[in-house]
Image (cartoon, rainbow, N blue to C red):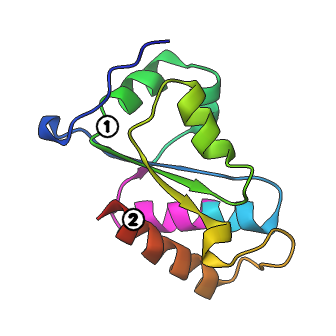
């Protein structure tokens, strides 16, 4: 599938795609993305819609000026899903690179805030 890549000059939305997996790091990624969206850093968007190639979700993603992918674990499901859909121009945040390990990283307010702050830095 050929996808037109976005350009910030068009002023499209900033989209945030997050892992929402069953593990603790999935919960952290999800809650950090929700925190970023609530604070106006971008719009959390539907990764399942990317996987399902839902036309409206694909079109909005094509128009994005910036995209942030937040992966909970090294399987990189968010990154891989975006790439398989033809999107390659995005920033990537991998929680394992922040020292968060699957199965031993409780989704505390402090951890969620730390990941959200790092997400903001990655987008900057």
* Residue 68 vertical position relative to residue 88 in the rendered view, above or below: below
Q: Residue at x 58, y 43 (%)?
A: 79
Q: Give the residue at x 56% y 56%.
A: 70
Q: Which residue lies furthest to the top in this view?
A: 1
Residue that appears at 41% across and 45% down = 90
Q: As rendered, which of 21 and 94 lies closer to the eye?
A: 94
Label total for image: 2
Query: What residue does disc 2 label?
Result: 122
Q: What element carries label 1?
A: loop
Residue 28 placed where, x, y %?
A: 66, 68
- Dot label at residue 116: none
Quarter of the C terminus within the rendering: bottom left
Seen from the viewer's position, the closer of residues 99 and 22 is 99
Whether residue 39 is in magenta: the answer is: yes
Residue 66, image x, y percentages: 32, 46
Earlier sequence position, callout 1 versus callout 2: 1
Quarter assignment of residue 23: bottom right
Estimate how packed mark 1 is, as few (under 14), some (14 to 19) or many (20 or more) residues with alpha carbons within 10 Å: many
Q: Residue 64 carries which label?
A: 1
Q: Where is residue 109 in the image (x, y as percent from the top left)?
A: 62, 84
SS assignment for the magenta stretch, majority:
helix
Which residue occupies the foreground of this view, 83 or 111? 83
The image position of residue 21, as x and y in percent, is 76, 53
- For this orientation, the residue located farthest to the bottom is 110
Q: Is mark 2 on a helix, strand or loop?
A: helix
Magenta range: 30-43
Q: In this view, does 3 lie to the left or right of 47?
A: left
């Amino acid at each position: 599938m050929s996808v037109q890549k976005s350009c910030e000059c068009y002023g499209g939305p900033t989209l945030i795609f997050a892992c929402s997996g069953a593990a603790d790091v999935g919960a952290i990624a999800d809650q950090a993305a929700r925190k970023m969206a609530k604070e106006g850093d971008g719009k959390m968007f539907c990764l399942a819609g990317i996987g399902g190639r839902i036309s409206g979700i694909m079109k909005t993603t094509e128009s994005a000026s910036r995209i942030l992918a937040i992966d909970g674990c090294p399987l990189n499901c968010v990154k891989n899903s975006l790439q398989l859909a033809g999107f390659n121009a995005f920033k990537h945040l991998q929680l394992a690179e922040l020292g968060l390990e699957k199965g031993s990283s409780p989704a505390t307010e402090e951890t969620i805030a730390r990941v959200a702050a790092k997400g903001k830095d990655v987008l900057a």
